[in-house]
Image (cartoon, coloured by chain):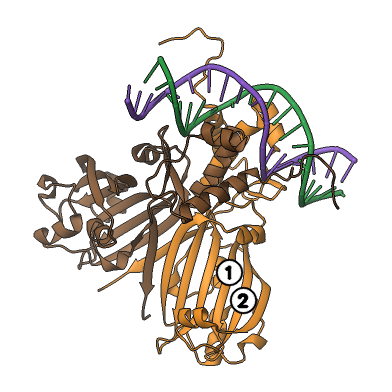
Chain colours: A brown, B orange, C purple, D green
Amino acid sequence: MTSNSPTTDRNGNHYRHLEQHFRYLIHQKALQPGDKLPSEREIGEQFRLTRITVRQALQTLEAQGLIYRQNRRGWFVSPPAVAYNPAQRKSFIEYVSKQGLFPHTELISQEIISADQQLAAQMQTQKGTPLLKLHRRRSIEGRPVLIEHMILNVDLLSGIEKEDLSQSLTRMLPKFGQTYHAMDLTFKSTALPNSAAADLGIATGLPGLQIERINYNEAGEILEIDYEYWRHDAVIIQVGIHGQ
Amino acid sequence: MTSNSPTTDRNGNHYRHLEQHFRYLIHQKALQPGDKLPSEREIGEQFRLTRITVRQALQTLEAQGLIYRQNRRGWFVSPPAVAYNPAQRKSFIEYVSKQGLFPHTELISQEIISADQQLAAQMQTQKGTPLLKLHRRRSIEGRPVLIEHMILNVDLLSGIEKEDLSQSLTRMLPKFGQTYHAMDLTFKSTALPNSAAADLGIATGLPGLQIERINYNEAGEILEIDYEYWRHDAVIIQVGIHGQ
DNA sequence: CAGTGGTCTAGACCACTCC
DNA sequence: GAGTGGTCTAGACCACTGT
């Protein structure tokens, strides 16, 4: 079994060693959330590895949620993931700030449209119903973590398009005599669609978490359908299921 | 803007073209779930690309859940994801077969241990309580999709270690006068731990979905804690939240 | 055994960001 | 303009799978 080969280890563990090196630095807090890693070329020189090998190590750490990149800006240590409990009906702003992190919401676009056949079916309403399409980006600690595409039934929320739609909708609904009463949630781990990745400033095709949420009012009507695309490392979902 | 360079496109879209090629074949059902793709070298020759570029395309498709690989055996088209609704309290076998797919469970190991301080705290019981540790692998359509590590409180399920533990626990509990009454769930998108990846026969560091489930009986005692590691492309989670 | 994916070298050019 | 990550070439050896 012993080998006298001069190449002591050709098993291909180089990128794992590098991975463990950075994992150690991060756990020791020598590298802290938000810190920038050295450039891929620098790391390669230091460890006498090619960029491809370095990138493999970094991509593995990225998949583990320890580091992230922003398009051509470099690699950074990830902030801790935020816990999201849909059952609590707290707004994004509330649950992020309660966890000691700093939330931010940007409105990218808003548009009133008239429901076509397909949208009407999705929203369980009639063709021609006015709908508000919202497109928002949400950040935690200055890092964009989530792209939101929402469709709201304006018949049930008349005049909502005149509000400041970068604010929390959860808090806004009581004004319109509505609340989120029930919701259906679907979670899926998948690659981020190109458009969402672009909005988040990250390379396309990276793993992400897709959440589809259908919000009902007390009458069981659909108030809003929400498609969220999260960075996979930014969120942990917690749900309690009780009774039958 | 026009260029007379002989290399018509140096933007680096090669792997995206390849990605679209296979996406098209899969959507057209020219490639069906379970089918094997040509080898990386063959694809490279056909499209005049290096293996690294081919692999990047394949890895992107993998992140999207369209294809998967099994260690050194090749790349295959993914079967459809199964929908998992924890609130329905159906067993794995039930919800998979109801979706027209074929489930299978293997018991990898089982062991009775005595709770140490840490485990006792987790299970909200006393130090020394007998616990049953289970390690199972579950497959859909012959593809291993899920590794399960479970810890059961044997004081509440006395004699369970003598049952056939590759069977559904959900169905077994009534025998012991217990049912799953409530559960706390945590979902996290992360890389699979090396051991889970090895058990699933896939390369380490690939994206996965981690589910932690704490199961309570009617008295509010913890019956079981379950850690599941899913292939990220094998499952969609659906949850309904009702009332307050 | 041949064939496959897993890992790696040693370069290169490009698009974009930052200064 | 210098530096960064994003993409790509043209090879190589290895561990493991299937026969």
Compared across the picture, whether A189 is left or right of A33 comes to: right
Element at badge 1? strand
Closer to the chain start, of discs 2 and 1, is 2
- Report if the CB atoms under discs 2 and 1 are less than 8 Å apart: yes
Whether B19 is drawn above or below A137: the answer is above
Image mark 2: chain: B
| Residue nearest the viewer, comparing A66 with B184 | A66
Whether B132 is drawn above or below A75: the answer is below
Quadrant assignment, res A236 = bottom left
Q: Amino acid at mark 1?
A: Glu
Q: Position of residue A79 (x, y in %)?
A: 37, 52
Quadrant location, the C terminus of chain A:
bottom left
Disc sitting over residue A66 in the figure = none
Give the residue number, with chain letter if any, for mark 1: B148
Whether A157 is drawn above or below A52: the answer is below
* Residue A224 in view here: yes
Mark 2–mark 1 distance (CA, rounded to whole Å): 8 Å
Is there one chain holding both mark 2 and mark 1? yes
| Residue nearest the viewer, comparing A23 with A67 | A23
Q: Position of residue A132 (x, y in %)?
A: 20, 46
Give the residue number, with chain letter if any, for mark 2: B134
Compared across the picture, whether A55 is left or right of A3 comes to: left
Compared across the picture, whether B240 is left or right of B157 comes to: left
